[in-house]
């Protein structure tokens, strides 16, 4: 990412704006597609992150509700929309929600996506792995731990700073 930024700055010079979407031609169809992709990506990502919550709620509904598949599908759609709406309303009501999400993201995402899979892989295949592979995986785990702790610290510090500045 840093290399890409350096190459872009060296190619386009000082006139390069800090957001890539501001550097694009205004009336190009490609620009419009990229702008919409930029807008829609976080929404789809958010929906995917909610998937475990909504899936567990769906399983509970399916166990206790003996209805037609069409009704269950409608209930599932309604429930998923309600969960998304509740979180959106919650984020508007509580002004520090972004820091809470950053805290959860930095602590849990690194743990779930990097640290635990590496730890489980090492636990299962430790005797079969070469030392170089073990060292690489352990290095990844340590780097993930550093990134997770740093992100957690920054988000907590941001929450405390924001809270202190708003109460003063």
Image (cartoon, grey):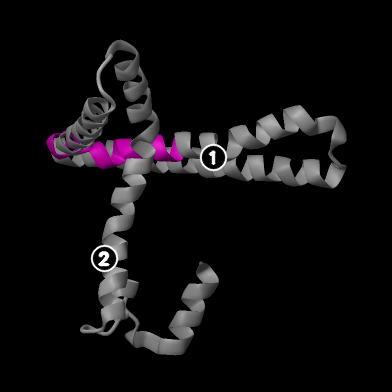
Q: Specify whether 166 is left or right of 52.
A: left
Q: Earlier in the sequence, mark 1 or mark 2?
A: 2
Q: Which residue is mark 2?
A: 36
Residue 34's x, y, as percent?
A: 32, 70
In the image shown, does 164 or 93 lie closer to the viewer? 93
Residue 119's x, y, as percent?
A: 67, 32
In the image shown, does 70 or 81 lie closer to the viewer? 70
Q: Which residue is mark 1?
A: 113
Q: Secondary structure at mark 2?
A: helix
Q: Specify whether 104 is left or right of 83.
A: right
Q: Specify whether 137 is left or right of 151.
A: right
Is residue 135 in the magenta section?
no
Residue drawn at x 21%, y 36% as measured from the top left = 81
Residue 11's x, y, as percent?
A: 46, 88
Query: Quick check: can you spot residue 64?
Result: yes
Residue drawn at x 60%, y 32% as measured from the top left = 116
Dot 1 alpha-carbon crowd within 10 angstroms: few under 14, some 14 to 19, many 20 or more: few
The quadrant of the rendering that contains the C terminus is top left
Q: Residue furthest top?
A: 64
In the image shown, does 21 or 7 lie closer to the viewer? 21
Which mark, by number, is residue 159?
Answer: none
Is residue 94 in the magenta section?
yes
Bounds of the magenta segment:
90-107
């Amino acid at each position: 990412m840093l290399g890409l930024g350096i190459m872009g700055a060296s190619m386009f010079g000082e006139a390069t704006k800090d957001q890539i979407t501001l550097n694009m031609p205004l009336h190009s169809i490609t620009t419009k597609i990229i702008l919409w992709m930029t807008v829609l990506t976080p929404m789809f990502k958010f929906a995917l992150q909610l998937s475990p919550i909504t899936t567990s709620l769906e399983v509970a509904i399916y166990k206790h509700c003996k209805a037609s598949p069409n009704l269950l599908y409608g209930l599932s759609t309604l429930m998923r929309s309600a969960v998304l709406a509740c979180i959106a309303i919650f984020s508007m009501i509580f002004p520090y929600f972004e820091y809470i999400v950053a805290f959860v993201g930095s602590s849990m995402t690194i743990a779930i996506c990097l640290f635990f899979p590496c730890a489980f892989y090492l636990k299962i295949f430790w005797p079969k792995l070469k030392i170089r592979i073990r060292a690489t995986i352990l290095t990844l785990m340590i780097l993930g731990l550093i990134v997770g702790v740093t992100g957690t610290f920054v988000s907590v510090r941001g929450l405390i700073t924001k809270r202190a500045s708003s109460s003063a």
